[in-house]
Image: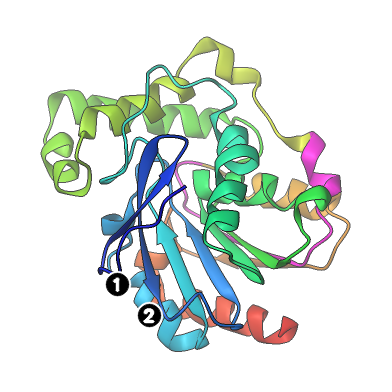
Amino acid sequence: MKQSSNTEIKFLEIDSKIIEYQVFGDISNDIPVLILLHEGLGSIAMWRKIPELIHLKTKLNVFVYSRFGYGKSSTIKLPRPTNYMSIEAEEYLPKIIKSLSIKNYFLIGHSDGGTIASIGSKSKNIEQLLGTILIAPHFFVEQESINAIEDISYQYKYKNLKSKLERFHNDVDNAFWGWSNVWLSPDFKNWNILKYLPQIKTPILALQGTNDPYGTINQINILEQKVRGPFDKVVIKDCGHNPFTEYTDKTIEHINAFIKKII
């Protein structure tokens, strides 16, 4: 695993593939690191100013990267397996953390990234994990999610969504179809990670918008029922799938307050 020179966007070699990453602060010091995990169509570029704003608000280090198949990171072979989020959490995320010698950290995941953060918070993984923040995570498949992904797939294929996403990914087809085809596959309908939830004992903050087309409040309600550690739930009214963009200040304030309770 090789780390690149100190540039604004850096590159890390993992298993003969490349991920792009960016750091706000200095992850070589003893200050905790906030690891941001993007949504199913996300990348470093799609976070826009959010990582910097979180860094300025919390005064902690922020580490953000594009998973394989996204942004400027290496592409992936399609189709993705149905357990692709478990692979990210159990195989690649620990390698990244170890490669960069990240010691004390929080996981902050949005959508697919929230699911990955949840799996990465199982008790066997948490030696240096201080807490986990989940924004619109998925733990099981809802029809609302399928309907929304069918709609966005139509927009990508026949409208102008592809052109909008092209500036965020080197291979936009690899990113989009790698995500949507899994969710719309018959084998994915029975996917869930409910068995992992009782294994999460670290503090959790879960945020969910009431108008999220990709998932209902039932996602974080079942999380609340099953986790064994401290749990904070925030329901944001009149908010869709991304509280970071719709209620930026409020969302970052909730994150900061949660972190300050721990450190």
Name the one closer to the observer, 20 or 208.
20
What secondary structure is found at the residue carrying circle 2?
helix
User: Position of 22 compared to 216: left or right?
Assistant: left
Magenta part of the protein: which range?
195-214
Residue hosting label 2: 53
Measured as percent of width and height from the top left, residue 246 is found at 36, 66
Instruction: Tell which residue pokes out farthest to the right in this image.
Output: 228
Q: Which residue lies under the disc numbered 1?
A: 49
Q: Where is residue 226? Give x, y as percent.
A: 84, 48
**Residue beneath the point at 57% across and 76% down:** 255
Quadrant position of residue 76: top left
Q: Are marks 1 and 2 in contact (CB under 8 Å)?
A: yes
Residue 137 appears in the figure: no
Q: In this view, does 175 lie above or below 187?
A: below
Q: Quadrant of residue 55?
A: bottom left
Q: How many numbered marks appear?
A: 2
Badge 2 local density, few (<14 within 10 Å), some, or many (20+)?
some
**Residue 103 x/y as whole percent:** 65, 69
